[in-house]
Image (tube, coloured by chain):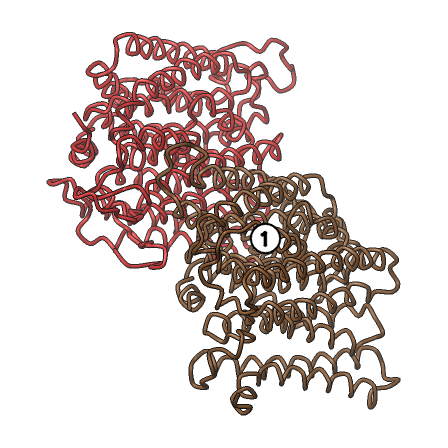
C-alpha cells in the first residue's frame, strides 16, 4: 500500500504544480521539492519495510480487478529488483528539482510534465501486471517530448521527436509480444492462463517454440529504451537537447525502464527464449560498451561525451542480463542504480553547473577550468572517476559483478572485449577531464579567460552531495542493495531451464 | 402489434421529432425577422430540450425502470441494452454539437440547421438499433441526406458547395452499392432480418453481396480507397458539422457493419473469403490515412486523414469475427468519436473567434491565450494517438487484443492476425509524428498575437465533459463494456 503513494504523490504533484500560476515559480519549486522528497521518503520506507529473506514480493501488495473484460488487474508491489530502482528514481527526482532551482519560464508546466514522467516511472517499477506496466511505460513517454521541446536546447524539435518515435517503436514491439504472451501462456497442467497478471504468468509458462520469437520482440522493444545498439541513437541527441532535469531523468531512470522491462518481462517470463538469445544479447552489449566509449572519446560537445558514456554504461546492464547467472544479473541491477546516480550527476554538472557559468559546452572553448572554478572542477573529476569505475564508488562494484558473472557463462572473448571497453572508458574519462579542466584554450579570449567563476550555489551543492553520497555509500557497502537484489533474482533464475 | 408498446419504445425518438417541429415552427412564426443571435439561441434551446428529454427516457429504458419490448417484427427495431446505450450516447453527443453550432452562426437558415442536426441524430439512433436490411438502410440514408445538406449551409464559402457536391455524388454512388449489396444478401438468404440469418451457406452471391456492402459502408466510414470525399468535406463543412460527420455518422456506420457481419460468424468458408478483403481495406486505410496526414498543414484536413487511418484500425477488430471483436469495434468507435468531436469542438471555438481557416500555425501559443482549450485538445489528440491512460489507447488495445485472440496459435507469420496488428502498431507510431506536430503548435510554440477567446459556458461544459469522458473511459471502461456486450 505504501508503495502506491509514490505514484499518487507524483501525479498529484503534477496536477498541483500545473494549476499554480507560472508567475509563482518560487513557490512552485518548493512544492516540487516537497513532492520529490516525499516520493524519496516513501521509497526508503518501502526499502526498510521489505524483508529480503524469501526474496518474493512485498506482503502488502495491492491486487485488485481493474478491467475484468480483458483480464486486467491492478497489482502494485515490489521485490528486491524494483527497490534499488525506486530509490534511484526518488534520488534523481529530488536532485532534478535542485538543479532546476533557477528555472522560471513556464515553471508550472515544467513541473507538471516532470512529475507526470516521474509518476509513470514509479508506476513501471511497481506494476506487477503486464498491461499496467505497459500503461505506465507509455505514460512516461509523452512528458519527455514536451520537456525537451519546450525547455530544451539546440535541435530540440528533432531530438524530442526522435526520442518519442523510438520509444513508441519499442513499445509497439512490446505490445505485440505482450499479447502473444497473454494468449499462449499456460499453467503447468497445460491449461491456457489468459491473464496479464505477472504473478500468475510466472507460475505458468509460454511454449518454448513461441518463446523463441516472442523474446526478441519484447527484449528489443524494451532495450531500445535502454539505449541498445543499434537503436541507441535517440539517447545522445535526446540527452543533449533536453533541459538538465530532463536529461538527468532520461539518463538516470528512463533508460532503466527499458532495462527493467528486459529483466522483469523478457527474461522473467520467457526464460527459454532468454537462454537461446543470450549470446546475441551479449554480443550487442559488448558493442554498446566498446562503441559507446570510443564514440565518447571523439566528441567535442561535453554533453555528447556524457550521452555516449551512458550508452556505454548501459551496455554493462545488458551484459549482466545476458549472463543469466546470479552474480552477473545482480551486477546488472546494481549497475542500473549506479549509473542512474552517476549519470544524473554528470548531466547535472555539465548541463547546469558548468554551462550556466561558461555558457558553452564545447570542449575546445573551455580554458583551464581547474583554475577558474576549482571547487566545481574537483567535484566533476571525482564524479568522472566514479563513472569510470574507481573502487569505493558503486560503479566499480557493479561492473566487477557483471564481469565475474560473464566469466562464468559467456565465452572468454566477450569478457576480454568488455575489459577493452573498460580501458576505453578510462581513456575517454581522463582525456575529457584533461580537455575540460586542464587544457589551455587554443584561441584564448583575452578579456574573459582570467576571470574566475562563482562557486556552486546551495541547491547545487545539496544535489551533488546526495548523488555522490549515494554512489559512495553503495560503493562501500554494496550489501545494502545486493542483499535485497540477489534473493529476488534467485527466484527469477530458478525458472531457467537447465 | 401493441401500439402502446411501440409508442413507449419510440418515445425518445418522438420527443426529438416534436422538438424538431417546434424549432422550425417557432423560428418561422414568432421569431420571423428577429436578430440572428436570438433565433440561434431559441432553436438551440428547443433542440437541446428535445434531446435531453429523449436522453432521459433512454436512461430509464436502459436502467430497466421502463421496460420496452426487445424487438419488433423482422428486426426493424432491436432495443437491447447495448443498442439503447449506443443510442443514448449518440443523443448525448448530438447534444454536445448544439452549442458549437450555435456559436458559429454560419447561415441565416437557423431552424433548418438545427432541424437537420436533429434529423441526423434521429437517423443514427435508428441505424444502431435496427437489424433489418431495409430499416437500417433507410435510417442510414436519413443520416446521409441530412449531412449532405448541412455541409452546404455556409453559402458564403464556395469551397463548401464544392465539398458538399462531392460528398453528395460519392455518397449517392456508395448508397447504390450498399443497396445493391443488400438486395443480393436478401436474394441469397430470403431474409430481411439480420438476426434470423442463421447458418449462411457459402456462395459466390453472398461474397459479392458483402463486397458491395463493404463499398457502401466503406464510404460512410471513409475507408481507403473510398475516402476521397473526406478531406474536402472535413475542411469545408461548417466545423460543428464536420465534427458530427466525423463522430456520430461513424458510430452509426460501424455499428451497422458489425450487425451486417454477425450472420457470417457461423460460416467459416465465408469468413475466410471476406477476411482478405477486410484486411486489404484496413491496410490501405492505415497507409493512406497516416501517410496522407503527415503532410497536411490544415488541421481539419489532418483530422480527416486521421479519421481514415482510424477507420483502418477499426477493421482490425472487425476481422476477428468474434464477440470480443464486436465489442472492441463498438467501444473503439465510441471513444474515437468522443475524442474526434472534442478536437473539432476546440477547433470550432478557436476558428470562429479568430476567423481563420484552421491552419495548424493559427493555433500557435494556445497554451498562453487559452490554456483550458489547449489542455482539452491535448487530451483529445493524445486519445486519438492512443496514449494511455486515455480511452483511445484502451480502444486500440482492445481491437488488437481481439484480433490476436481470434487465432493466437500462428504457425507462420501470415497465420492469424499478428502481421495485421504489427502493421497497425507501426502505423500508430507513424501517426504520432503528425499528432505531436499539432500539439507542438498548441502547447510549445510562442503565441503570434494574443486575441482573447471567449469559449462560452455551453461549449466550455461540452468540451470539459468530453475530455473527462475520454479520460474516465480509459481508466474505468468496465461499465460501458458490460453495457455494450448486451
Q: Determine the residue positioned at 26% across, 35% down.
A: A207
- Quadrant where the C terminus of chain B is found in the figure: bottom left
Asked if residue A16 can be seen in this view, the reply is no
Percent from the top left, x then y, of residue A167? 48, 36
Chain ID, brown in image? B
Q: Against B42, is B187 above or below?
A: above
**Camera-nearest residue between B253 and B475:** B253
Asked if residue B441 can be seen in this view, the reply is yes
Q: Which residue is mark 1?
A: B205
Tell me the chain of label 1: B
Residue B482 sits in quarter: bottom left
Percent from the top left, x then y, of residue B114? 73, 75
Residue placed furthest toward the left: A53
**Camera-nearest residue between A18 and B61:** B61
Q: Decide if residue A310 is on the left or right side of residue B458.
A: left
Q: Determine the residue positioned at 42% across, 65% down.
A: B485
Q: Against B364, is B451 above or below?
A: below
Q: What colour denotes chain A?
A: red
**Camera-nearest residue between A354 and A257:** A257
Q: Secondary structure at mark 1?
A: helix
Q: Against B20, is A207 above or below?
A: above
Q: Decide if residue B143 is on the left or right side of residue B429.
A: right
Residue A319 sits in quarter: top left
Percent from the top left, x then y, of residue B311? 59, 51
Percent from the top left, x then y, of residue A478? 20, 28
What crowding class fits label 1: few (fewer than 14 Cα within 10 Å), some (14-19), or many (20 or more)? some
Amino acid at each position: 500500500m505504501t508503495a502506491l503513494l509514490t505514484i499518487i504523490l507524483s501525479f498529484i504533484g503534477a496536477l498541483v504544480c500545473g494549476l499554480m500560476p507560472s508567475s509563482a515559480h518560487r513557490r512552485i519549486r518548493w512544492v516540487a521539492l516537497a513532492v520529490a522528497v516525499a516520493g524519496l521518503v516513501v521509497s526508503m520506507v518501502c526499502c526498510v519495510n521489505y524483508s529480503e529473506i524469501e526474496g518474493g514480493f512485498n506482503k502488502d501488495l495491492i491486487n485488485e480487478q481493474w478491467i475484468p473484460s480483458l483480464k486486467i488487474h491492478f497489482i502494485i508491489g515490489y521485490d528486491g529488483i524494483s527497490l534499488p530502482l525506486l530509490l534511484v528514481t526518488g534520488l534523481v527526482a529530488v536532485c532534478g528539482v535542485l538543479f532546476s532551482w533557477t528555472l522560471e519560464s513556464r515553471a508550472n508546466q515544467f513541473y507538471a510534465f516532470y512529475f507526470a514522467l516521474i509518476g509513470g516511472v514509479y508506476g513501471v517499477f511497481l506494476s506487477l501486471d503486464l498491461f499496467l506496466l505497459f500503461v505506465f511505460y507509455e505514460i512516461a513517454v509523452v512528458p519527455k517530448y514536451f520537456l525537451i521541446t519546450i525547455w530544451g536546447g539546440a535541435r530540440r524539435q528533432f531530438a524530442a521527436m526522435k526520442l518519442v518515435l523510438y520509444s513508441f517503436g519499442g513499445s509497439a514491439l512490446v505490445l505485440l509480444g505482450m499479447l502473444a504472451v497473454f494468449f499462449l501462456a499456460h499453467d503447468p497442467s497445460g491449461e491456457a492462463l489468459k491473464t496479464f497478471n505477472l504473478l500468475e504468468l510466472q507460475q505458468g509458462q509460454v511454449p518454448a517454440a513461441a518463446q523463441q520469437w516472442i523474446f526478441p520482440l519484447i527484449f528489443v522493444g524494451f532495450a531500445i529504451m535502454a539505449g541498445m545498439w543499434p537503436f541507441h541513437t535517440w539517447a545522445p541527441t535526446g540527452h543533449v537537447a533536453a533541459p538538465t532535469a530532463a536529461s538527468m531523468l532520461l539518463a538516470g531512470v528512463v533508460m532503466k525502464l527499458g532495462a527493467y522491462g528486459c529483466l522483469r518481462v523478457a527474461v522473467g517470463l520467457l526464460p527459454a527464449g532468454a537462454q537461446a538469445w543470450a549470446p546475441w544479447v551479449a554480443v550487442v552489449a559488448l558493442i554498446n560498451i566498446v562503441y559507446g566509449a570510443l564514440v565518447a572519446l571523439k566528441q567535442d560537445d561535453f554533453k555528447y561525451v556524457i550521452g555516449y558514456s551512458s550508452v556505454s554504461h548501459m551496455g554493462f546492464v545488458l551484459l549482466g542480463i545476458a549472463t543469466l547467472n546470479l552474480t552477473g544479473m545482480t551486477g546488472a541491477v546494481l549497475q542500473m542504480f549506479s549509473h542512474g546516480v552517476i549519470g544524473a550527476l554528470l548531466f547535472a554538472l555539465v548541463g547546469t553547473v558548468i554551462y550556466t557559468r561558461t555558457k558553452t559546452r564545447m570542449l575546445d572553448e573551455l580554458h583551464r577550468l581547474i583554475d577558474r572554478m576549482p571547487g566545481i572542477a574537483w567535484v566533476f573529476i571525482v564524479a568522472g572517476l566514479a563513472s569510470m569505475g574507481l573502487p569505493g564508488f558503486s560503479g566499480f562494484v557493479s561492473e566487477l559483478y557483471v564481469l565475474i558473472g560473464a566469466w562464468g557463462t559467456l565465452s572468454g572473448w566477450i569478457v576480454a572485449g568488455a575489459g577493452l571497453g573498460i580501458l576505453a572508458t578510462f581513456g575517454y574519462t581522463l582525456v575529457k577531464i584533461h580537455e575540460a579542466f586542464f587544457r589551455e584554450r587554443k584561441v584564448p579570449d583575452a578579456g574573459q579567460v582570467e576571470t574566475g567563476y562563482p562557486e556552486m550555489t546551495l541547491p547545487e551543492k545539496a544535489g551533488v552531495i546526495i548523488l555522490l553520497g549515494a554512489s559512495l555509500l553503495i560503493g562501500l557497502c554494496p550489501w545494502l542493495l545486493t542483499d535485497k537484489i540477489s534473493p529476488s533474482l534467485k527466484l527469477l533464475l530458478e525458472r531457467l531451464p537447465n | 402489434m401493441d401500439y402502446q408498446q411501440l409508442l413507449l419504445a419510440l418515445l425518445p425518438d418522438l420527443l426529438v421529432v416534436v422538438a424538431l417541429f417546434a424549432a422550425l415552427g417557432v423560428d418561422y412564426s414568432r421569431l420571423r425577422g428577429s436578430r440572428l443571435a436570438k433565433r440561434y439561441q431559441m432553436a438551440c434551446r428547443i433542440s437541446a430540450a428535445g434531446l435531453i428529454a429523449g436522453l432521459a427516457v433512454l436512461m430509464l429504458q436502459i436502467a430497466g425502470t421502463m421496460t420496452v419490448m426487445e424487438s419488433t417484427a423482422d428486426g426493424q427495431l432491436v432495443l437491447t441494452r447495448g443498442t439503447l446505450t449506443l443510442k443514448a450516447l449518440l443523443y448525448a453527443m448530438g447534444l454536445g454539437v448544439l452549442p458549437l453550432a450555435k456559436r458559429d452562426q454560419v447561415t441565416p437558415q437557423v431552424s433548418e440547421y438545427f432541424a437537420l442536426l436533429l434529423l441526423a441524430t434521429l437517423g443514427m439512433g435508428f441505424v444502431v438499433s435496427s437489424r433489418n436490411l431495409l430499416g437500417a438502410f433507410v435510417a442510414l440514408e436519413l443520416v446521409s441526406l441530412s449531412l449532405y445538406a448541412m455541409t452546404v449551409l455556409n453559402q458564403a464559402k464556395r469551397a463548401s458547395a464544392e465539398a458538399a457536391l462531392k460528398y453528395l455524388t460519392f455518397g449517392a454512388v456508395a448508397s447504390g452499392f450498399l443497396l445493391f449489396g443488400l438486395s443480393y444478401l436478401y436474394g441469397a438468404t430470403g431474409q430481411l432480418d439480420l438476426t434470423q440469418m442463421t447458418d449462411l451457406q457459402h456462395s459466390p452471391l453472398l461474397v459479392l453481396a458483402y463486397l458491395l456492402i463493404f463499398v457502401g459502408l466503406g464510404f460512410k466510414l471513409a475507408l481507403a480507397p473510398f475516402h476521397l470525399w473526406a478531406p474536402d468535406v472535413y475542411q469545408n463543412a461548417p466545423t460543428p458539422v464536420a465534427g458530427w460527420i466525423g463522430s456520430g455518422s461513424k458510430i452509426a456506420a460501424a455499428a451497422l457493419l458489425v450487425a451486417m457481419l454477425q450472420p457470417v460468424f457461423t460460416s467459416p468458408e465465408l469468413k475466410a473469403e471476406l477476411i482478405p478483403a477486410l484486411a486489404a481495406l484496413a491496410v490501405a486505410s492505415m497507409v493512406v490515412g497516416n501517410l496522407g496526414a503527415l503532410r497536411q498543414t490544415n488541421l481539419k484536413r489532418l483530422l480527416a486523414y486521421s479519421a481514415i487511418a482510424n477507420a483502418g484500425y477499426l477493421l482490425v477488430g472487425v476481422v476477428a469475427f468474434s464477440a470480443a471483436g464486436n465489442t472492441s469495434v463498438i467501444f473503439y468507435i465510441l471513444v474515437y468519436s468522443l475524442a474526434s468531436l472534442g478536437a473539432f469542438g476546440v477547433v470550432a471555438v478557436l476558428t470562429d473567434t479568430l476567423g481563420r481557416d484552421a491552419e495548424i500555425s493559427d493555433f500557435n501559443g494556445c497554451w498562453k491565450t487559452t490554456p483550458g482549450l489547449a489542455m482539452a485538445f491535448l487530451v483529445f489528440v493524445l486519445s486519438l494517438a492512443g496514449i494511455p491512460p486515455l480511452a483511445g489507447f484502451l480502444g486500440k488495445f482492445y481491437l488488437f487484443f481481439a484480433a490476436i485472440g481470434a487465432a493466437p496459435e500462428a504457425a507462420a507469420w501470415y497465420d492469424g492476425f499478428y502481421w495485421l496488428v504489427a502493421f497497425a502498431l507501426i502505423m500508430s507510431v507513424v501517426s504520432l509524428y503528425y499528432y505531436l506536430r499539432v500539439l507542438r503548435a498548441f502547447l510549445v510554440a510562442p503565441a503570434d498575437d494574443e486575441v482573447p477567446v471567449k469559449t462560452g459556458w455551453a461549449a466550455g461544459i461540452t468540451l470539459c465533459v468530453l475530455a473527462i469522458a475520454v479520460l474516465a473511459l480509459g481508466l474505468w471502461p468496465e461499465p460501458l463494456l458490460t453495457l455494450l456486450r448486451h
